[in-house]
Amino acid sequence: MHDILPEDQPYFQRVAEVTANLVEFYGFKRIDPTVLENVEVFTRGIGEVTDIVEKEMYVLKTRGGDALAMRPEFTAGIARSYIEHGMCALPHPVKLYTTGPIFRAERPQAGRYRQFNQWDLEVFGEDSPAIDAQVIQVCWNILRELGLRDIIVEVNSIGDSQCRPYYKKLLMNYLRSRQNNMCADCRARLKKNPLRVLDCKEERCRKVVSNAPKIVDHLCEPCNNHFKEVLEFLDELELPYRLNHCLVRGLDYYTRTVFEIFSEGVPVKKDKEKKKEGSANEACPIETPGQIALVGGGRFDNLIKMLGGKDTPACGAASGIERLVNLMKTQGVRPTKPLLPQVFLAQIGILAKRKSLRLFEEFRKSRIRVVESLGRDSLKAQLGRAQKAEVRYALILGQQEALDGTVIIRDMGVGRQETVKLERAVEEMKKRLKK
């Protein structure tokens, strides 16, 4: 787990600002689901044999014996809230978004933390392929608005309950004779969920699945038509994308469209961790060297029903904010420059400090940024701080000025000074700062 230090705050604030502005333009409303959820929300929603539930979820027992989990992702919790608060009665589609911390007991490595932050957006109650395309478009626009370069969409369809069982049998027949060439995890997945083998990042498993049957070749007619329309929408939007037949996402609730957005051309660190992460297999690229997954999502039409609600189509996506910030730094993208103080308020003596506190509030109400050093009495030290802060003006309030009801305005550029009445100080600074 890690702290977000002051020097990184502008990056995180920039991501939050861009995300909120864009998603609200598309009609999304903010929701803040709870950090703790009943474990069943995730075991039923995400799937008991997923890595998140089996290996990464933080689970705790309450004094009453209830099993709670610290949220390892947002979608299942937002779906639970949608059901619990009767949002099915609202005009549809219901568009929701959130940001906040996520918790997973992952193996720590570069860019991966056990507590990290995500933005997440979900659309409930609409099965149109246009929604799939719009969700991808919103995610794409967030990344572009942040100034990130070399990004591309990878997309696939994993079918639904009608066509996926047949494909699973085909895949099982293909993988069974090759399981000796697969990792231990994938050999176990063969019995529980063979689709997860396609998602494995081990080099040997990537080689095995490179020639496996492709699910898009075995979609039922409704799923095939849905996916075809999604791609046509992406063509119309002129979003660069490529088909990735091995993309299945790691969660059981996905149906039909799944996608990820990658950044390519990322400098590769030649260390042991990086060698383990991906494969150069061209057929099924999943975080290959020089490539970072920034956004992942897709359609999850069965999740609401799995959690006890009505049959409700849905689509959504999420992104790890730490990854976005790291890439912004790597690509030299600077966050919006923070507003710097324009005035330094120097004071000498107790009476002057009292007057300056009130004056400081008047500047705040007028939205003029002021910096001060209340703990120091030396005028020389305070003016030294004013120079380092690169303010245009310093206001000097000494004991005599406090008694006279005046203040000295010092132009830090030329060193010229002028005394004005204390009650006119704010208005006088408004005039000068406009010049």
Image (cartoon, helix red, strand yellow):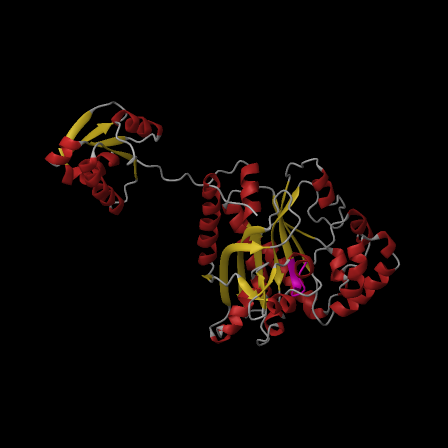
Question: Which corner quadrant of the image does residue 306 belong to?
Answer: bottom right
Name the spot of residue 249 as percent of width and height, x first: 67, 58
> Left of 215 or right of it: where is 128?
left
Residue 356: image location, x then y, percent: 22, 39
Vertical comparison of 402 with 358: above or below: above
Q: Can residue 406 be found in the magenta stretch? A: no
Q: Which residues are magenta?
A: 250-258
Residue appearing at x 89%, y 59% in the figure: 177
| Residue 38 as seen in the image, left or right of residue 351 | right
Q: Give x and y (percent) for residue 281.
A: 77, 46
Single out the residue that lies furthest toward the left: 404
Residue in front for this viewpoint, 8 or 199: 8
Q: Nearer the viewer, residue 395 or 294?
A: 395
Q: Nearer the viewer, residue 359 or 127?
A: 359
Residue ID at (31%, 29%): 386
Q: Quadrant of residue 125?
A: bottom right
Q: Is residue 257 magenta?
A: yes
Q: Position of residue 115 (x, y in %)?
A: 57, 51
Residue shown at the point (60%, 72%) measured from the top left:
307
Residue 142 in view: yes
Q: Residue furthest front?
A: 63
Q: Where 139 falls versus 149 (above or below)?
A: below
Is 4 left or right of 414, judged from the image as shown?
right
Q: How many marks?
A: 0
Which quarter of the figure is the C terminus placed in? top left
Residue situated furthest right in the rendering: 177
Can residue 301 be spotted in the picture?
no
